[in-house]
Image (spheres, coloured by chain):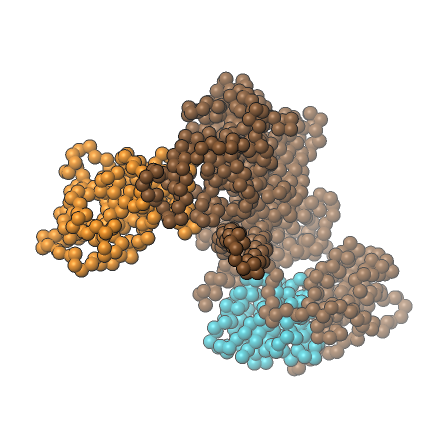
Amino acid sequence: MADSGDRAREEFLSEAQEIVEGLGRDLLALDEGLRASRLDPSLINDVFRAVHTLKGLAGLFGATRMASLSHELEELLDKLRLGKVDLTAAVLDLLFRSVQLYGLILQAEKEGRDQVIPQVDELVRELHRNADGAAVASPTSSRYELDPSLLAVLTEYEEHRLRANIAQGLRLYRLRVQFQLATIDQALDELKAMAKPHGEIITYLPTGAGADADSIELDILMASAIPVDELRRALASGGVDLEEIPRRSSSGPSSLSQVELERSSPVYAPPPSGRVPSLAPPLHPDELIAGPKGELGTLRSVAQTVRVDIHKLDHLMNIVGELSIVRTSMARLVERLRAARIERDLAADVHRLQRTFERHLEAMQQGILEVRMVPLGQVFDKLARVVRQISREADKLVNLVITGAETEVDKLIVEELSDPLMHMMRNAIDHGIETRSEREAVGKPALGTIALNAFQKGNHVVIEIEDDGRGIDTTRLLEASVRRGVISPDDARSISRSEILTLIFIPGVSTKREVSETSGRGVGMDVVKTNISKLGGVIDVQSEAGIGTKMTVTLPITLAIISALVVMVEDRLFAIPLANVQEAVVLDPGAVRVIDGREVVTLRGSTLQLCRLARLFELESQATQPTTNGWPTSATSGAPGSVSNDARPAPRKTSTRQYVVVTAVGARRLGLVVGTLVGEQDVVIKALGPSLKGVRGFAGASELGDQRIALVIDAPSLVDELHAPGGERIRPLIASRGSHG
Amino acid sequence: MANLARRSGSPAGLRRARPQDRGPRTEYLAFVLAGDVYAAPVSFVREILKPPPLTPVPRAPHAIMGIVSVRGQLVTVVDLRRRLRLAEPVPTRRARILLAAASGGETLGLFVDEVLQVYRLSESEKEPAVAALGGDVAPYIEGIARPSLGSGLAAGGRRSVEGRTEQESHISVVILLDLRAVLGFS
Amino acid sequence: MVRILLVEDSTAMRTYVRSALEGAPELNDDLEIVEAASGFDALRLLPRAAYDLVITDINMPDINGLELVRFVRQSERHREIPLLIISTQSSDRDRDRGLALGANWFLAKPFTPEALRHAVTQSLSGRSSQPGDAAGGRF
């Protein structure tokens, strides 16, 4: 039992985490609703149910802190949903704090820490105080001709909702509909979507009748303000049989039993047989709905999502990566087979087989990648809560507008993203958005806006954080940088405005006199940039004084397999991730000019700085040595390495045609000068070992098959290196003293 | 490829233990760097490979020759001769890469000109560095050894390397390396 | 062989129940537990096999446990299946209704594995608790 007990506990923590996240989202929606004076009672109920479930789980698994918090919360939420307490901003605050505390408690539970968490006790006391709302008189004596069988199966909450709707004078309807069991979830969702705009669904009750064993008939109790014909029209496509539940007329008795909606006692069944007496027959003849007979699925039914250990996914990804290499090798083999004059048919068969293999491999690769993808909304929800909290603490009015929360990113990236994004949010609120009076003084609306956007762009995902605040003060920034020795006074004079902005990414540069409380540990933008780089991404900043600041983070969609452009420089192979490549053009040597020590060409009207890889990587001097399989050899002695000799004499400069691969990183471009364009290929990037950590310019290395390795170029770091103020200038054969040591 | 971790006992014929040499013996792998014979405890060496195709890494530290792929894993190759500031003759067919574990769990490949054999050295066959070579010795030199006849074990099989018999290839002086110190300088 | 249908929307809860029942000496070792995550899942699974017991939570979205109990008791095929309700108790109302609708046994959360096993064995042997009895297993 110990093993399954551990598993159960793991499930508990994982499920509790999910519930708390959902809770956070619902609270945000409630917040919005509150501001728009539009409260959705089903949301409050969802929140109640979530806390109720947490309480149950906590009790079962001995998480006493969670249990006591949930207990108090549940009391408050119960009163809320029953209308005994009003949902105000203050109450909502308490709820938000609870979500935060749940997070703390879960963390402690995961780490096995048992001690008392003082904030929990504090919040519990406050919740207790707030739960003493005035009792609202429940409506009495509205009589409807409701089937007692229907009433008997309402849960307490459903009964309350029914009363509440009746109190508002809404009409009650009974919808009868038949569904195929196999497809019922989807069909029900569609029906709910159709019905929701017109009223509230109170409960669903299977009638027990059904055309056959594969279908089921449901009675749905619904409250709505619109008259029966209109509702019938609205739900026409749902195959619904609709009838209104009439109010008892004051004149005569009706044929159905009348039930008073007070706290009615349940209908008791005679004990011994345990059977319920037969109830009133259905009111209308059944309407058969023709539908395809779907298969009912397996005997074991589980929830539709599966929680997957990320390490297992990694393992799968590695295997896919290895298969990718096999695929390339196989393609080469097939080529050789076709070139060799063997049986035509055989060659064709092999070729066909290879094509099929490639197709399936591609599909599998895609499938696994999709499994790893999660929507950014996960992180955005957390950000929204943080924004709410910080803006209240900083006493600033902030409106957060989110788009693109459904954009998906690799799960590992999502987890690493929350810290950097949170930091940028804090910056935007603390230092970007001005106080209310400051804003009004310059004619801006008192409510500041932060836009959080995410969208996919090719192989990348772009996340933007844009505020309409005061912008970055470039003068002070430059001053501070010079003062800290980050940039020399000379360079400071010639620096361009966009280059000044990049100074915020250098450690130690800060124009804030004191680190505000909410900025936390005083972590700077340099750490944010490092974190983003670790994910293979880049960050860009734009800012206008008085108008606002925009941070743009560009991330690769997946870490492991990327499409790359393979190039040759002085006989060496390199791979450049296609995501960074804008285009490749032939280099016209005559068009190269030197400006300020840097080589540039003009590409369609704009200046493009060049970087000769052969020179940067010091390959020219080594080009005169003969090699075998990469190892230096002499002409006479035998070559080291494996039998498949790849002896090459010192390469002479034959055709001088070169290419420029235009890489773009955000708004900055760099033209990498290479010898040959070999082709495009999917590659698996593997990290270089720690002993090569200090080497600039490479994101890793990749095997191209036949044990050949191509170094993968880290375009962002090259752009940084070459664009840096005071960076590498053209001084051939002399080591340059760059700004990064 | 020889996996030294799996080596068991020595071929029976070569063992001639002398009474005063009974005591703990450590196995050392001997290899050639720039014409001289060096050795390091076998426990540090996980594998001996023929050099796979090498990809040099531009702007890498001077002693790093590049990277190779070993069963799908990227391994950084360090030139031991350069690291120990020795001459660097052109690699021959006898060159080998020793896979060793460096700090932090990384596997490094150490380039050597030739691999010779495994010696089982007792304490009496080893002389500490200072005693043998005087004061000013690099920290990565553990000492020198004068292996006696019979303490040698052919690496990789009963026949010694390249057909030379044990007698012919008997080396008088072996420089013992502290690989940890050698690799620690990265 | 004893086949049990477990209807409960919380995964952790289902795992807890499963681990409490599997390998319990007082139950048959030949135990099969089929899980349903919603009332609809339960409706899909019921016709597929012969169940010796249905364990269901009350508070579930869409079709709640009370409705499921009523459905089972009303259906020709399944009306004799023992029904065990598990639920968090905020009042006696749910318990009373569940038992009135024909459930055999009621178990309040949080319950110990022992209490669960006891309730299961009692339900399997056809015993019922009556409305007004102390709810089985509450401690």
Colour of chain C in the rendered structure image = cyan
Q: Which residue does the image show at 28% across and 53% down from the upper left?
A: B4
Q: Is residue A314 visible?
A: no
Q: Residue A561 location in percent, x, y? A: 53, 47
Q: Quadrant of the C terminus of chain A?
A: top left
Q: Quadrant of the N terminus of chain A?
A: bottom left
Q: A17 and A315: which one is in front?
A: A315
Q: Is residue B12 visible?
A: yes
Q: Is residue B30 above or below residue B131?
A: below
Q: Residue furthest front?
A: A341
Q: Which residue does the image show at 50% across and 62% down from the upper left?
A: A8
How many numbered marks have been drawn onto this rendered protein structure? 0
Colour of chain A in the rendered structure image = brown
Image chain in orange: B
* Apparent side of residue A527 relative to residue B34 in the rendered image (left or right): right
Q: Residue C111 location in percent, x, y? A: 53, 67
Q: Is residue A83 above or below residue B181?
A: below
Q: Which residue does the image show at 90% across and 68% down from the upper left?
A: A251
Q: A288 and A104: which one is in front?
A: A288
* Apparent side of residue A97 relative to residue A195 in the rendered image (left or right): left
Q: A241 and A227: which one is in front?
A: A241
Q: Residue furthest bottom?
A: A272
Q: Which residue does the image show at 57% across and 55% down from the upper left?
A: A358
* Apparent side of residue A116 relative to residue A265 in the rendered image (left or right): left
Q: A436 and A535: which one is in front?
A: A535
